[in-house]
Amino acid sequence: MRKVFILTGMPGAGKEEFVKVAQELGYRIVRMGDVVRQEAERREVAMDDRGVGGFADSERRLHGPAIWAERCLAVLGDGDFVIDGSRSLMELEAFRRSLGKSARLVAVHTSPDERFRRLQLRGRRDAPRDRSEFDERDARELGWGIGSLIALAGTMLVNEGALYDFRTTARNELERAW
């Protein structure tokens, strides 16, 4: 049976580490954020957090709350996948409607202080410049419904310790019988 992990969690929680382990195990990856950033860049949106986040939000208002899930499903091929970055119950519904029992929702959780530290270290173009911008981003994500999605995840992976420990936990989840 095909395996598709729908991955959720707040920015900086460690979803990318889960993805790296999945890639090592042969999973194909679709990053919802990449789909958003590619479309934003194509439309010449400012490639900072406010620009990309505002664009993602406006697309949800224009095309419905599941638009980014639908755009990700359009690029999904055969095989086992991790879809990284689901943010709302409507996205989850779109994934489950299309993928059925092959979809499993996994949430990665990390404290806000640790997530802020990680986002600062990673240094992506859309990283928050300060704690105020970080809090604004969290509020936007929570406004999209990510908190409900995290609460309903079948599996919650806590990522507060050593990277090796989290990667082991991720590997165990990815190798678990369906």
Image: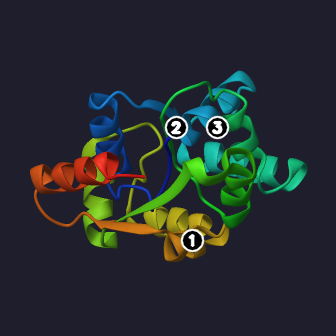
Residue at 44% in and 37% down: 125
- Contact (Cβ within 8 Å) of mark 2 with mark 1: no
Judged by depth in the image, the label closer to the viewer, 2 or 3, is 2
**Numbered-mark total:** 3
Q: Is tag 2's residue or tag 3's residue first in the polypeptide sequence?
A: 2
Q: Name the element at disc 2.
A: strand
Coloration mode: rainbow
Q: Residue 31 carries which label?
A: 2
Tell me: 19 left or right of 74.
Answer: left
Tell me: 110 left or right of 37.
Answer: left
Q: Distance between the residues labelled 2 and 1?
A: 21 Å
Q: Is tag 3's residue or tag 1's residue first in the polypeptide sequence?
A: 3
Tell me: 38 left or right of 153.
Answer: right
Q: Name the element at disc 3.
A: helix
Q: How far apart are marks 3 and 1 (CA)?
A: 19 Å
Going by the numbered disc 1, the residue's amino acid type is Ala
Q: Residue 36 carries which label?
A: 3
Q: Name the element at disc 1.
A: helix
Q: Residues within 10 Å of mark 2 (few under 14, many from 20)?
A: some
Q: Is 30 rendered above or below residue 120?
A: above
Q: In which quarter of the image is residue 148?
A: bottom right
**Residue 150 horizontal/vertical position (percent):** 50, 70
**Residue 165 horizontal/vertical position (percent):** 12, 56
**Residue 48 horizontal/vertical position (percent):** 54, 41
Q: In this figure, which residue is indicated by the disc labeled 1? A: 139
| Residue 46 visible here | no
Tell me: 110 left or right of 54.
Answer: left
Q: Residues within 10 Å of mark 3 (few under 14, many from 20)?
A: some
Q: Is tag 2's residue or tag 1's residue first in the polypeptide sequence?
A: 2
Going by the numbered disc 3, the residue's amino acid type is Val
